Image (spheres, helix red, strand yellow):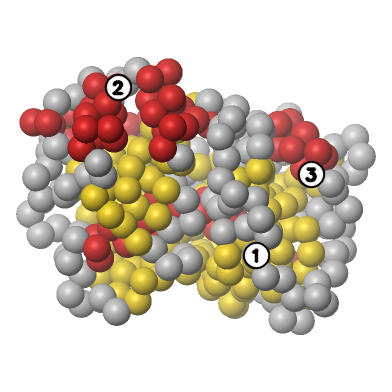
Amino acid sequence: MTSQASPRTSPTGQGPHPDSLTAPDALVTSDALRSPDTVEVLRYSAFTADPTGGNLAGVVLDAASLDDARMLAIAADVGYSETAFVTAHDTTARRYRLRYFSPRAEVAFCGHATIATAVALASRYGTGELLFDTPAGEIRVGTGLVDGSAQATLTSVPAHSHPAEEATQVDPVLRALRWTRNDLDDDLPPHVAFAGNDHLVLGVRSRARLAALDYDFDALRDLMRQHGWTTVHLVHRAGPGRLDFHARDPFPVGGVVEDPATGAAAAAFGGYLRALGLVTEPLRVHIRQGEDMGRPSDLYVDVQPDDPQVRVTGQAVPLPAPGR
């Protein structure tokens, strides 16, 4: 996915970081793009085992010497919705400082770029637990192999969710989506959910309505800027009591119509389900996203009734450098 990034970003204040973090060695690999100043940019597709699916992310494992302007320029050159930068590390503790840039600005947290970075690190240093210090807070990620493919599970910051305001949030968004109240699922009320970023969650009654998404790009973008939402997370439940959902995430604040896999929204959705009282025992939820835009993605969300943190699992695959 080639995109332009959001003109509105999340806070960029750094979270706690260990003083002993140092820059990783430069890595040159076959799936890396060598930029003119030798910065190595890895390209991955996250939440898929198929490079034609999932959400594309750039990963820079050696970013200690890069200033903000250079990271922003690299993200713009890569052109994906987000590129992740490892700005410091402690390889013994497997602890890394991670920052995320869209082509226009820094963002506090990005789920699919986190999964991609974890898989990139695991492929070089071995699978196991990783700890990422991000602007949104501390993120733990477990990595391993499933049927020979790399997989990562991120543990979100504490997630929370509250009802959306009907007159100023829900109704204007419905107009931008060209939907009516009848299109919403009464069992999944509108909420604003958070797990590192805010997302408006709308439950959709009909799978056909979700598949036919055609919204007013500028109107929705302006509403999202106004309320500070990263995406609008549109979900359709496969059936009563089911734990599988189809999702679509309009992303006009990022300059693109839609995001094919949104780990941060999936984590927020886990907190949303918990806030609704639907999590009375440990649950694993499957979210199928990107299908209607031709980049199918699979996100697995684990939620505990007594734990505000949410776990999101997905695979990631490396992509060849452009021109190869």
- Quick one: SS at disc 2? helix
Residue 156 as seen in the image, left or right of residue 178: right
Q: In the rendered view, would you say 251 is above or below 123?
A: above
Number of callouts in the render?
A: 3
Q: Amino acid at mark 3?
A: Asp
Residue depicted at 66% across the width and 43% down the height:
106
Q: In the rendered view, would you say 111 is above or below 20?
A: above
Using a 10 Å C-alpha cutoff, classify the residue at mark 2 as few (fewer than 14 neighbours), some (14 to 19) or many (20 or more).
Answer: some
Residue 179 as seen in the image, left or right of residue 146: left
Say whether marks 2 and 3 touch (CB < 8 Å): no
| Distance between the alpha carbons at the discs numbered 3 and 1 | 16 Å
- Quick one: SS at disc 1? loop
Residue depicted at 56% across the width and 53% down the height:
109
- Quick one: SS at disc 3? helix
Using a 10 Å C-alpha cutoff, classify the residue at mark 1 as few (fewer than 14 neighbours), some (14 to 19) or many (20 or more).
Answer: few
Residue 167 screen position, x and y as percent: 22, 32
Q: Amino acid at mark 1?
A: Gly
In front: label 3 or label 1: 1
Say whether marks 3 and 1 touch (CB < 8 Å): no
Residue bearing the label numbered 1: 15
Can residue 260 be seen at all in this image of the molecule? no
| Distance between the alpha carbons at the discs numbered 2 and 1 | 35 Å
Residue depicted at 71% across the width and 31% down the height:
76
Can residue 278 be seen at all in this image of the molecule? yes
Residue bearing the label numbered 2: 176
Between 279 and 211, the one nearer to me in the picture: 279
Residue bearing the label numbered 3: 68
Residue depicted at 12% across the width and 31% down the height:
181
